[in-house]
Image (spheres, rainbow, N blue to C red):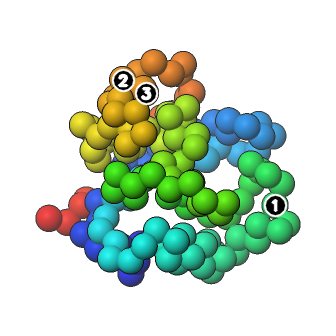
């Protein structure tokens, strides 16, 4: 991600039970935060290219099923984007602890740009979704 984002911070790695399509292995999740100089649409293109490099073929996948790599843009600053191929904030982030828990590790005071409600309050109100910390991939560089 360092080739795409500048000044990156990476959360711990989390293991999560599948949420929508249950007949698959657990997921590994983390959040990466960083600076990006271009627009959100170009970030989406760069991330989808990275997914393809890791073997992702969206045309052959079961929706919400197993995939080699899935990178979502959850937030892009405080922008609100509603386009056919891109919705930011991600439309389901506020119901997914596997997004909110690692996000809050990096940005504990962050709030939803749409509602202004702190993500900590949103996360705490969700039922337990089996998000377990697996550890740190590496220490963030200062």
Q: CA distance from mark 2 to mark 1?
A: 34 Å
**Residue at the spot x=58%, y=43% of the render?**
91
Question: Is residue 136 or residue 41 the one in the foreground?
Answer: 41
Element at label 3: helix
Element at label 1: loop
Residue 132 in the image: state x and y as whole percent: 48, 35
On the picture, is 71 further left or further right than 101?
right
On the picture, is 8 further left or further right than 127?
left
Assign the N terminus to one quadrant of the image.
bottom left
Q: Is residue 119 visible?
A: no
Which residue is labeled 1 in the image?
61
On the picture, is 5 further left or further right than 26?
left
Dot 3 or dot 1, earlier in sequence: 1
Element at label 2: helix
Residue 120 in the image: state x and y as whole percent: 34, 29
Residue 141 in the image: state x and y as whole percent: 20, 66
Q: Mark 1: few, some, or many residues within 10 Å (few <14, many ≥20)? A: few
């Amino acid at each position: 991600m360092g080739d795409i984002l500048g000044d990156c911070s990476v959360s711990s790695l989390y293991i999560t039970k599948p949420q929508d399509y249950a007949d698959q292995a657990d997921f590994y999740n983390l959040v990466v935060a960083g600076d990006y100089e271009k627009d959100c649409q170009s970030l989406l293109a760069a991330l989808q290219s990275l997914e393809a490099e890791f073997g992702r073929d969206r045309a052959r996948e079961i929706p919400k099923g197993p995939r080699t790599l899935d990178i979502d843009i959850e937030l892009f600053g405080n922008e609100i984007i509603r386009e056919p191929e891109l919705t930011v904030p991600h439309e389901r982030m506020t119901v997914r602890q596997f997004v909110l828990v690692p996000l809050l590790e990096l940005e504990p005071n962050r709030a939803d740009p749409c509602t202004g409600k702190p993500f900590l309050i949103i996360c705490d109100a969700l039922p337990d979704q089996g998000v377990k910390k697996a550890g740190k991939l590496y220490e963030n560089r200062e």
